[in-house]
């Protein structure tokens, strides 16, 4: 039984050639190919070729480089821009073979020299051109997929690094929280044990001052020194109690600037004693905040006293208040430690306390909120002031940070959500 070989699908060819004679020769040559199945469309200008792409698809383009409306390599570039997925075979004259090679380097799949090829050669070159174009597309797709995979891998690695960094931060925060909790329990126990004996000593010294000392100035002086020492010890114990178990907040609507002014009044004597100039920049119409005024006043007094001690001979204390919306830079500048979180776009009320002192050594900046950390001489401080201040601010949902100013001195910034 005779079988008929299946016919190959017809190839749609767009011939762009302004010479009717050359076009007729190519069309005749293709008709003479055994088993040829070509649908040939002939146009004479590049503009007409572009229009044909809008009317249908083509398997290959036979393109003359010398057209009335385009000439040379630019013709290939323009056509490929309109139909990037269609293979192009360039037609050159006998003296333009070098241009054909340049055309291949510029994106064409092959070239043919008019007058030197027959129908079989033209058909074979067109098939090979189509296969090469398909291979190029596959390679380009594979490269794009590889690039996407690489980007995804880099993104995954970046996310893993970030997760690892976040995990380290959380780990350090857990260690810090455990340490702070332990210190708090110890401080609370110590404060409870010491408070009662101190009260007894204070009562005894007060009794001796009023009933025993009489007019003896030496005895009165000694007893007064003892009384002052007991009061200092009692203040330290009170600080320990606040650090261990801060009392409940008694909040009400308050103006942050007004609290800062009240705190300044409490340290007015110290400011004058050290010849410190105060520069106030209080914003008007600040949003009211729900605050415990006594506790926030304690935060300000602590910040002011630290600034005063940093300027023993003289200096400038600048106190500002303002309201603003946080941007990305503001949020990034917040300490990356535990505490309330702030978001871009949130409205906050800010208090900033700047001094013109020498600043804090960089190696100590990260420690200023640690319990019992202090650079003051023995007997001049317990290292609990900023620790208690931060706890008070965070109980109000705020943040407090300390940094060195570029122009010198230290800046303490307190933020509350409006």
Image: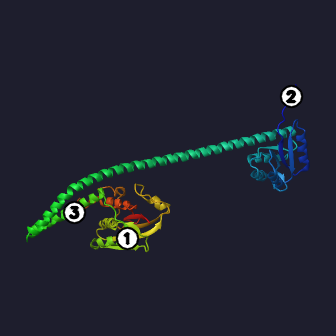
> Is 223 left, or right, of 405 in this rendering?
left
Question: Is disc 1 surrounded by few (<14), some (14 to 19) or many (20+) residues within 10 Å?
Answer: some
Q: Nearer the viewer, residue 254 or 297?
A: 254
Instruction: Tell me the tag on residue 232.
Output: 3
Residue that protrudes farthest toward the top in the picture: 1
Compared across the picture, whether 371 is left or right of 222 comes to: right
Counting other residues with Cα less than 10 Å from the Cα at mark 3, is it few (<14), some (14-19), or many (20 or more)?
A: few
Q: Position of residue 376 (x, y in %)?
A: 27, 60
Q: Earlier in the sequence, mark 1 or mark 2?
A: 2
Q: Quadrant of the N terminus?
A: top right
Q: For this rendering, which residue is in front, 72 or 287?
A: 287
Q: Identify residue for label 1.
A: 318
Placement of 345 over or under 85, stated as above or below: below
Residue 360 seen in this snapshot: no
**Which numbered circle lies on residue 3?**
2
Q: Considering the numbered disc 1 on the image, is that residue within a helix, a strand or a loop?
A: strand
Circle nearer the N terminus (3, 2):
2
Mark on residue 163? Answer: none
For mark 3, give the secondary structure. Answer: helix
How many numbered circles are shown?
3
Q: Residues within 10 Å of mark 2 (few under 14, many from 20)?
A: few
Can you give x and y, in whole percent of width and height, for residue 29 in the image? Answer: 89, 41
Q: Earlier in the sequence, mark 1 or mark 3?
A: 3
Residue shown at 68%/42% (left/top)? 139
Could you tell me how far apart the alpha carbons at marks 1 and 3 are, in whole angstroms? 29 Å
**Callout 2: SS:** loop
Which picture quadrant has residue 25?
A: top right
- Is residue 108 in sight in this rendering? yes
Q: Position of residue 107 (x, y in %)?
A: 74, 47
Colour basis: rainbow
Q: Position of residue 91 (x, y in %)?
A: 83, 46
Mark 3 and mark 2: span between their CA atoms? 115 Å
């Amino acid at each position: 039984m005779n079988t008929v070989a299946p016919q190959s699908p017809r190839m749609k060819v767009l011939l762009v050639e302004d010479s009717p004679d050359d076009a007729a020769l190519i069309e005749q040559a293709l008709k003479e190919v055994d088993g040829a199945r070509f649908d040939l469309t002939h146009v004479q200008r590049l503009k007409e070729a572009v229009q044909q792409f809008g009317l249908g698809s083509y398997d290959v383009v036979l393109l003359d480089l010398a057209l009335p409306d385009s000439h040379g390599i630019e013709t290939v570039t323009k056509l490929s821009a309109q139909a990037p997925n269609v293979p192009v075979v360039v037609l050159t004259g006998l003296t333009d073979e070098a241009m054909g090679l340049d055309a291949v380097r510029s994106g064409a799949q092959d070239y043919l020299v008019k007058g030197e090829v027959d129908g079989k050669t033209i058909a074979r070159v067109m098939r090979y051109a189509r296969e090469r174009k398909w291979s190029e597309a596959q390679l380009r797709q594979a490269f794009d997929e590889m690039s996407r995979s690489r980007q995804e891998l880099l993104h995954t690695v970046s996310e893993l690094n970030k997760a690892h960094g976040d995990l380290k931060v959380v780990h350090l925060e857990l260690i810090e929280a455990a340490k702070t909790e332990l210190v708090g329990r110890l401080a609370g126990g110590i404060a409870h044990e010491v408070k009662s004996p101190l009260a007894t000593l204070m009562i005894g010294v007060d009794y001796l001052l009023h009933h025993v000392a009489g007019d003896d100035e030496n005895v009165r002086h000694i007893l007064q020194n003892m009384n002052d020492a007991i009061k200092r010890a009692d203040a330290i114990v009170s600080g320990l109690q606040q650090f261990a178990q801060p009392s409940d907040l008694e909040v009400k609507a308050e103006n942050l600037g007004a609290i800062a002014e009240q705190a300044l009044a409490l340290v007015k004597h110290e400011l004058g004693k050290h010849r410190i100039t105060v520069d106030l920049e209080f914003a008007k119409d600040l949003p009211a905040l729900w605050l415990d005024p006594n506790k926030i006043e304690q935060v300000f007094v602590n910040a002011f006293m630290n600034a005063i001690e940093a300027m023993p001979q003289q200096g400038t204390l600048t106190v500002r208040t303002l309201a603003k919306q946080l941007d990305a830079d503001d949020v990034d500048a917040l300490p990356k430690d535990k505490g309330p979180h702030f978001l871009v776009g949130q409205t906050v009320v800010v208090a900033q306390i700047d001094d013109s002192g020498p600043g804090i050594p960089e190696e100590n900046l990260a420690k200023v909120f640690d319990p019992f950390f202090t650079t003051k001489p023995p007997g001049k401080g317990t290292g609990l002031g900023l620790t208690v201040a931060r706890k008070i601010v965070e109980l109000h949902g705020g943040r407090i940070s300390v940094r060195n100013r570029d122009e010198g001195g230290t800046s303490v910034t307190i933020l509350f959500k409006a």
